[in-house]
Amino acid sequence: MKPVGEGELTMATAAEVVGMSTSRLNRINPVMQGYVDRGTLSGINVRINRHGETVFDAQYGNRDAEAGLPMTADTIFRIYSMTKPIVSTALMLLLEEGKFRLTDPVAAYIPAFAATKVMGPGGTLVDQARPMQVRDVLSHTSGLTYDFLPDFESGELYRKARLMNDPKRTLESLIDELATIPLAFQPGTRWHYSVGIDVAARLVEVISGQPLGKFLQDRMFGPLGMTDTGFGVAAAKVSRLAAMYGHPDLCAQDQTLLKIFSPGSMGVYARHDVSDTYPTDIPDLFVRGGHGLFSTIGDYTRFGQMLCNGGELGSERIIGRKTLELMHTNHLPAALLPYELAGLPNPGWGFGLGSRVMMNVAEQGGPGSVGEYGWAGAAKTYFWVDPQEDLVGVLMTQCMVGIELPEQDLRALAYQAIID
């Protein structure tokens, strides 16, 4: 089917014209409303685009249950790790300008990493067998980790340093201290979710000579019309911010992902004030690569649609098609597949430069297409781009981790509505 122009159709007519069924799309409503009615999620935003047209756009429940404020299309969310695809794309803009190569050592731009050791057996420290490369930080094969992951001793050092819990420290300061902590493993030898994209964010600053927030605004948010996306929320917009919910003991000192993901945690949630670690009012300081952005479903769908269009939206060309193809090709060798996140394997998926990439639909266990890609955030925001079907899907809610998977329901319901 020849794609229609962006925004040419009303949503009432768009679905059938672009090969989707309105009645089948409406099957999404009772499923998403069910999460709200059961008290599992306070509120949900859903949007689906096909061939550049919005074919489904719905809100459920409340953005703030205690205040009785309904979820709206312009509700603002903390998108946590859905910051990563945006920052990864930003770094690749500089690759297109010939400013670096993916095989360059990170230390060529951030010298502190030249001296970074690797944690060896019994707590010994050894040299890097080969330098950490730029592609390693984008593909989570760098040897870095996260403070909430229990796999390595280095994670405990992150926790002691409060690396990810002090929003008032600059990105430069954070990354320089990160470089003093030993790597968990030799670069390139395994996949492990990490603060690598925070390093990528600092690379954007060093290579471009601009603060990350300004670079994103000038090169992406401004051209794409993402007017509600950034590292802070203006005072006039704070009332649109969704409240955060999650496991009652989410912030306990001994909390781990394994405890939070346990079946006994399902549906047991409390409201959380996360403003100390994810503030709205210091956008010049609280600048990160792996989390930190605020956005709306409309803004993020514009980003996703740009990716699906091969790097452009309307008259704005953001990035080249071949660069996106490079980013969204699996970069992991067979020995590192399937990759695991918090001990949970992800069969059928590979990993590119900043996003998961579907390699095998049958192994993945649900509908989709080879080459589909996307990512998610800790508070259950989720997006995917399917170039084969010219499909973009986004789900926004605010519930920190847990084992419920509304995004898997949404994916299945979106694909069953395709009728061409």
Image (spheres, rainbow, N blue to C red):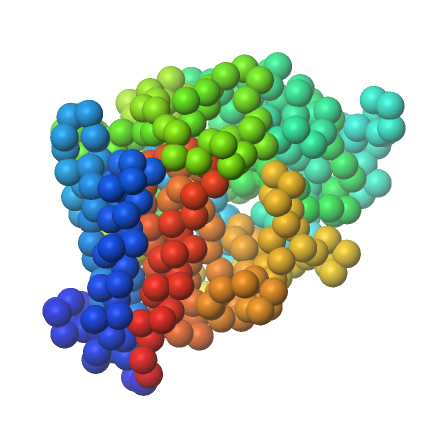
Give the position of the N terminus as an image quadrant. Answer: bottom left
Tell which of 418 and 336 is nearer to you: 418
Q: Residue at the location (40% across, 42% down)? A: 380
* Residue 288 spot, x, y in % from top left: 46, 33
Tell which of 418 and 147 is nearer to you: 418
Q: Residue at the location (27% across, 75% down)? A: 20
Tell which of 33 and 332 is nearer to you: 33
Please tell me in which quadrant of the rendered image residue 358 appears. Answer: bottom right
Please tell me in which quadrant of the rendered image residue 272 appears. Answer: top left
Q: Residue at the location (53% across, 50% down)? A: 354
* Residue 212 spot, x, y in % from top left: 42, 37
Count up the numbered dots: 0
Q: Residue at the location (25% across, 33% down)? A: 242
Q: Is residue 84 visible?
A: yes
Along the horizontal axis of the image, is 149 left or right of 115?
left
Along the horizontal axis of the image, is 374 left or right of 180?
left
Please tell me in which quadrant of the rendered image residue 287 appears. Answer: top left
Tell which of 338 and 197 is nearer to you: 338
> Up-down: is 51 above or below 404?
below
* Residue 256 spot, x, y in % from top left: 57, 26
> Up-down: is 316 above or below 343?
below
